[in-house]
Amino acid sequence: MAHVLSRLFLDRGALRATLALSSYATVLYCVAVALCLWPQLTFAATGYSRIMTATQFHTMMLARQAAQAGAAAQAIALANPGTSIAVRTITAATGWPGLAIAAGLVLAQMHLDAQQVQDIKAASATPGAPDIEGYPEPGGAEIRQCPGAPECMTNWVEYLTVPTPTPGGIGCKLAMVGDPPAGWNGWYSAQAPQTCLAFRYPWNPNPSQQSEPQPATAQDIQDYWNENPTGPNSPASNTSPVGSGQSATDASTVINDPVTPSDAPTTVVPSNQVPDDSVMIDPNATPPAGTQTTSTTTQQTTTTTTTTTNPDGSTTTQDDSSTTVQCSTGDHELRSFGAILEEHMTAWRGSGIAGQLALLQSLTWPSDLPTITWTSMQFGTFAVNFNDWSTMFLALRAIVIAGAGFAAYRIIFVGNG
């Protein structure tokens, strides 16, 4: 290594070539990065961006909060363990292409990971009620635990109340309420009129058992969110803006909520005046109508006088003038490279098979495959778990992506040729 470095530094020609090649490669790299990341700033003197301000974003989310919470609650109620859920607010297929904005751009996302989904289901589930095993409880029956309940007396462990149209303990049987639980003491008249009561001492048999909680329904989950609007598992605490240049978080179940420009108001501002708390919609927006173009011109003239002495003693004078003009233009409506590219992409999405290829942007591949069960009168019950064939689905996904990529290449770069 020392031998190579010594020859490199002693040979100035090789050193100059190495430095020149390194500088050239660095310049090419910087230009490529600028073209890919900031085309609107690279090719336009002054760019414009379509944004959604913080106020506009909150207005949009407030209008869609009920619909998104309902969709999320339905998905949570049906979710299996280990399932994460995302509700994405996306630009719809209508309205937005007219603004040179692709359909399917994620503006906002509510994301709940698998642990949050299970916590919400557990918190929303209906608690299990006391139940006496083997005893058919009459309609309206309630089991209360002692001490603490209003009817509790000395040494009572629990008691059962049943409403009846006939007052009195004897009236319970007359009103077709039936017998009390085996081994319990009853029926007696309760404090409330037309209510029958049976109670159990510690030495009586048939204690009540706590039943299993009822699974949470979509309405139970919405009620839980209404009671905890700002909790760590609430929709408001798990909704964040996304916009152009940002990636939405993946989830097992993705629900798309399409919006039109009227649902999501936007504003076009100069690219160097974008507020930090805004959502970027289009970094290469067309300037607003009526944008004024201002230009300034400076001119500098230089005159050179040449004096020549003739053979007869006379002199000849020649004036040479050169003028330098400098023009600078301010805001203008000239399209940038990024805006032209975006227009071409919009045209490709709206044309035939290319438009179908654009659907792959919003295509979500499931992580859990279903199990299908059917019953035949002759052969019995069959169950097919598609997870056992997951490798085939992976191969199918690779074929779809490869075929779509080849078709896109043919359409864009080859055309009809």
Image (cartoon, helix red, strand yellow):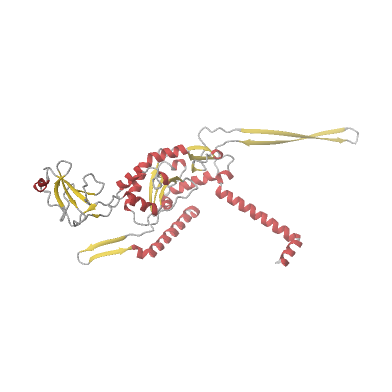
How far across and how far down the image is residue 172, in percent? 11, 47
> Would you say 192 lies left or right of 212 here?
left
Q: Residue furthest left?
A: 174
Point out residue 253 in the picture as x, y percentages from the top left corner.
37, 53
Viewed as shown, does residue 99 lie left or right of 381? right
The correct choice, above or below, for 60 with respect to 147 in the image is above
For the N terminus, the quadrant is: bottom right
User: In screen coordinates, is 340 left or right of 265?
Assistant: right
Q: Nearer the viewer, residue 274 or 137?
A: 137
In the orientation shown, which residue stands out farthest toward the front? 154
- Residue 90 on image: x %, y %: 41, 45
The structure residue drawn at horizontal position 21% and vertical position 45%, both measured from the top left corner, is 151
**How far across and how far down the image is residue 218, in percent?**
31, 48
Q: Residue at x 38, y 62 (%)?
A: 393
Residue at 51% across, 35% down: 288
Q: Is residue 75 visible?
A: no
Can the viewer see residue 401 in this picture? Answer: yes
Which residue is farthest right? 312
Q: How many numbered discs?
A: 0
The quadrant where residue 327 appears: top right
